[in-house]
């Protein structure tokens, strides 16, 4: 095929999208008002086409056209696609930016990015002076950062006269959503106009299964069942591609392995109903997959071959795959939820909402009638699935965003314009955490430390530890750790039992070689050994370590180092000294960030957390300390995992003396006292009054027993 005919076919493709007929009216609508809500079925062309229309209309002359996505994979793959359609190299006119990966240049005028990235840009430039249009996409997903952006843009640009002087012309804000909440969005944005792109959809028949009832939540059962159903579809249904919805990377890989194995034994002469079907192409799709593999997902399979994509929720609305006729729905999703039992955010597998299930089913009806096979029972639908998904802002920790808001001068974080208000106790909890790690003071104002912390796209505790290390001149110990904790899991755990034993043995050796007897130390050692080895990729292979993850960790480390260097050049960067051995120094730095995650041995193998929740926890079997619990009394940990038990992961033994002075801070402030601070900056007198009262209440020396 010649180059020009290839592009011709691309053009036809985009001209066939429902959005195409509305091009001129859409451009006029964007020009006509500060805020505009655009809605249309998934796959109608909103994400890939609207930015191109605005580009053609010349918006780029006044500033960049920015489009946010809640998911990094969507930002990357969509930018790739649009660069291809606009016939430019990715990173030139069309680029993307996601955390730790900036693929833009001076020429970039159409910029796809994650919502978190735009939030960071607002920190540096609240008037968004480089943009002529900002498009918040996938607003119906209600991600935490998109919700905050909505509030911020409303606050800043609702009043065109007042809105920031740094801009030459007006900013246009487009809010795109695939579902119905458009009235609510329009009302929120001062009754702004709504543009609806009429969609064409075809009927999808849904069937409930028998496998998952109200009591089944074990992942092994639903993985097996989706594999079985997908194979049934493959052998008994007419040609057409299959999309399977599962929960996460490991479940998807497991399902794909099972599918490969079973598909091998199909005899296409006898076993399949539709004789035009001659093979099965199995493709996984999840967030941390390499992008070149993701691209395959969108390509049409060879003739006679049925494509079966096994995906996370990413394929529900963010990415549209053409040719899907059958859906297999597991009924579950992996979701970050605040767990009040342990007082932390935890990734959990939970039933999807009914609206989510309808969205999933709808993916089969884009181009012709389709079928959706739900593996769960009608009873599960009725009893276990909520009507709607709760917005992230109402179910996860707000610590990082509240610090961002405060740094943007939004002091009244309770009366901030939220589309859906988080519970006040979540806001207060975030303020408490920020106060505990010295990011804000008692008046609720951001401290110099807080101003440094907000610059790092990391968990506040980890940032605090890193900054402590930097102050002590030993950032080389913490930067690699922070990088390793920011990438996907680096240790490979193969499914095959023999190979799993071999991998576990290797990982134990790695921990022993680190010599530090703590999991953070192992991460540091793996990073350093791999980096200095002659052939890093084969080193990884020998040690059952993901080379791809380590490569990202190297790049993340460099980027964190750059941020740190930039901040260190500011004169007010703190410095401290310490006399002691390196291992102690390392662990003390960790303590300064992770003192909120301290656990003390209670009885036998059970530990008890010190944060006021007093949860009973166990060390996770993946930890190098799993078998050495006998010698441990006090530990800190990076995160927790909840199954039938609460496990702590990435663990480090510490001495009580190192956290002794920090722990009282966990109990010092009553969250309700913070509520006045949350609403506004309190006056000096009020603080003085409060402090006297606090001092009277508080014993001067807090003993361990009291802390427990
Ligand atoms: O945003 P919306 O859901 O309205 O649609 P879109 O993402 O712009 O998708 C429009 C079309 O582009 C669909 O047919 C997708 O399959 C296609 N597309 C693609 O082929 N490759 C991508 N990386 C992204 C979209
Ligand atoms: Mg879209």
Image (cartoon, grey):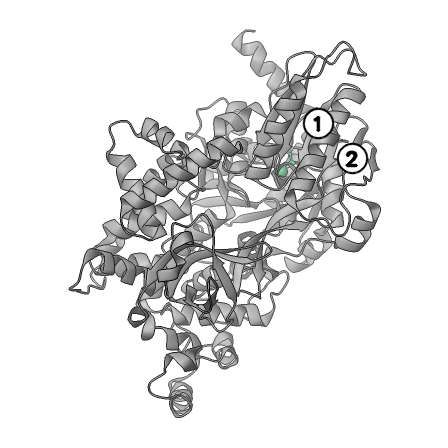
Q: Quadrant of residue 583?
A: bottom left
Identify the residue under disc 1: 242
Question: Ligand 2 falls in which quarter?
Answer: top right
Evaluate whether residue 125 shows in this view.
no
Above or below, 706 relative to 510: below
**In the image, the residue with mark 2 has its CB under 8 Å from the nearest atom of ligand 1:** no
- Badge 1 or badge 2: first in the primary sequence: 1
Residue 659: percent from left, percent from top: 33, 70
Residue 257: percent from left, percent from top: 59, 28
Above or below, 60 relative to 175: above
Tell me the residue at 56%/32% (across/down).
52
The outermost residue toward the top is 1
- Left or right of 137? Residue 303 is right
The front one of 627 and 646 is 627
How far apart in space, not on screen, are marks 1 and 2 (Cα)?
A: 10 Å
The front one of 571 and 51 is 571
The front one of 510 and 438 is 510
Residue 632: percent from left, percent from top: 36, 62
Above or below, 129 relative to 655: above
Q: Residue 120 — which label?
A: none
Which quarter of the image is occupied by the N terminus?
top right
- Left or right of 169? Residue 325 is right
Q: Residue 373 — which label?
A: 2
**Other residues around mark 1 within 10 Å, as few (<14) / some (14–19) / many (≥20):** many
Above or below, 116 relative to 395: above
Tell me the residue at 48%/80% (across/down).
670
**Other residues around mark 2 within 10 Å, as few (<14) / some (14–19) / many (≥20):** many
Which quarter of the image is occupied by the C terminus?
bottom left
Residue 476: percent from left, percent from top: 24, 49
Evaluate whether residue 77 shows in this view.
yes
The front one of 547 and 629 is 629
Tell me the residue at 53%/46% (across/down).
134
């Amino acid at each position: 095929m010649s180059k020009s005919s290839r592009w011709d076919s691309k053009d036809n493709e985009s001209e066939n999208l429902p959005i195409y007929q509305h091009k001129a009216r859409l451009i006029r609508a964007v020009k006509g008002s500060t805020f505009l809500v655009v809605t249309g079925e998934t796959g109608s062309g909103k994400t890939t086409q609207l930015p191109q229309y605005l580009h053609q209309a010349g918006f780029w002359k006044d500033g960049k056209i920015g489009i946010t996505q809640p998911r990094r994979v969507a930002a990357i793959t969509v930018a790739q696609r649009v660069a291809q359609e606009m016939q430019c190299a990715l990173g030139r006119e069309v680029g993307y930016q996601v955390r730790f990966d900036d693929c833009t240049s001076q020429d970039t005028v159409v910029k796809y990015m994650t919502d978190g990235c735009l939030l960071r840009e607002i920190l540096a430039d609240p008037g968004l002076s480089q943009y002529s249009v900002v498009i918040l996409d996938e607003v119906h997903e209600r991600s935490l950062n998109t919700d905050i952006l909505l509030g911020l843009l409303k606050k800043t640009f609702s009043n065109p006269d007042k809105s920031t002087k740094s801009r030459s012309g007006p900013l246009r804000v487009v809010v795109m959503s695939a579902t119905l909440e458009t009235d609510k969005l329009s009302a929120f944005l001062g009754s702004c106009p709504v543009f609806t792109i009429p969609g064409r959809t075809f009927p999808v028949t849904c069937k409930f299964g028998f496998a998952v009832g109200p009591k089944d939540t074990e992942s092994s059962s639903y993985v097996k069942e989706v594999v079985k159903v997908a194979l049934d579809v493959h052998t008994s249904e007419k040609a057409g591609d299959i999309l399977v919805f599962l929960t996460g990377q490991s479940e998807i890989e497991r399902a794909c392995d099972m599918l490969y194995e079973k598909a091998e034994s199909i005899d296409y002469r006898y076993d399949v109903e539709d004789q035009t079907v001659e093979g099965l192409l199995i493709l996984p799709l999840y967030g941390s997959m390499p992008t070149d593999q993701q691209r395959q997902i969108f390509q049409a399979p060879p003739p006679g071959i049925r494509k079966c994509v096994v995906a996370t929720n990413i394929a529900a609305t963010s990415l549209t795959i053409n040719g899907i006729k059958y859906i297999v729905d597991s009924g579950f999703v992996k979701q970050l939820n605040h767990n009040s039992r342990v007082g932390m955010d935890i990734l959990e597998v939970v039933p999807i909402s009914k609206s989510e299930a309808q969205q999933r089913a709808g993916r089969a009806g884009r181009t012709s009638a389709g079928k959706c096979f739900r593996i769960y029972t009608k009873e599960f639908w009725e009893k276990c699935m909520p009507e709607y998904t709760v917005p992230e802002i109402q179910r996860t920790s707000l610590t990082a965003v509240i610090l961002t808001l405060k740094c943007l001068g939004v002091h009244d974080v309770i009366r901030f314009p939220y589309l859906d208000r988080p519970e006040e106790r979540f806001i207060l909890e975030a303020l408490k955490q920020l106060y505990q790690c010295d990011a804000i003071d008692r008046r609720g104002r951001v401290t110099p430390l807080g101003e440094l912390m907000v610059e790092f796209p990391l968990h506040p505790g980890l940032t605090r530890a890193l900054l402590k290390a930097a102050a002590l001149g030993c950032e080389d110990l913490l930067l690699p750790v922070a990088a390793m904790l920011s990438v996907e899991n680096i240790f490979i755990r193969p499914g095959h039992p023999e190979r799993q034993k071999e991998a576990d043995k290797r990982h134990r050796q790695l921990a022993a070689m680190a010599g530090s007897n703590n999991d953070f130390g192992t991460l540091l050692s793996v990073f350093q050994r791999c980096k200095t080895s002659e052939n890093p990729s084969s080193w990884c292979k020998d040690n059952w370590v993901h080379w791809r993850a380590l490569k990202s960790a190297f790049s993340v480390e460099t980027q964190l180092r750059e941020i740190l260097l930039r901040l260190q050049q500011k004169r007010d960067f703190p410095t401290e000294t310490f006399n002691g051995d390196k291992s102690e120094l390392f662990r003390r730095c960790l303590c300064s960030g992770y003192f909120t995650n301290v656990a003390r041995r209670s009885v036998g193998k059970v530990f008890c957390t010190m944060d006021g929740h007093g949860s009973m926890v166990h060390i996770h079997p993946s930890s190098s300390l799993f078998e050495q619990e006998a010698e441990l009394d006090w530990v800190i940990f990076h995160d927790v995992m909840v199954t039938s038990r609460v496990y702590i992961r990435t663990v480090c033994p510490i001495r009580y003396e190192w956290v002794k002075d920090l722990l009282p801070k966990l109990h010092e402030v009553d969250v309700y006292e913070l509520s006045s601070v949350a609403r506004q900056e309190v006056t000096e007198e009020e603080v003085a009054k409060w402090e006297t009262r606090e001092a009277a209440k508080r014993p001067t020396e807090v003993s361990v027993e009291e802390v427990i």
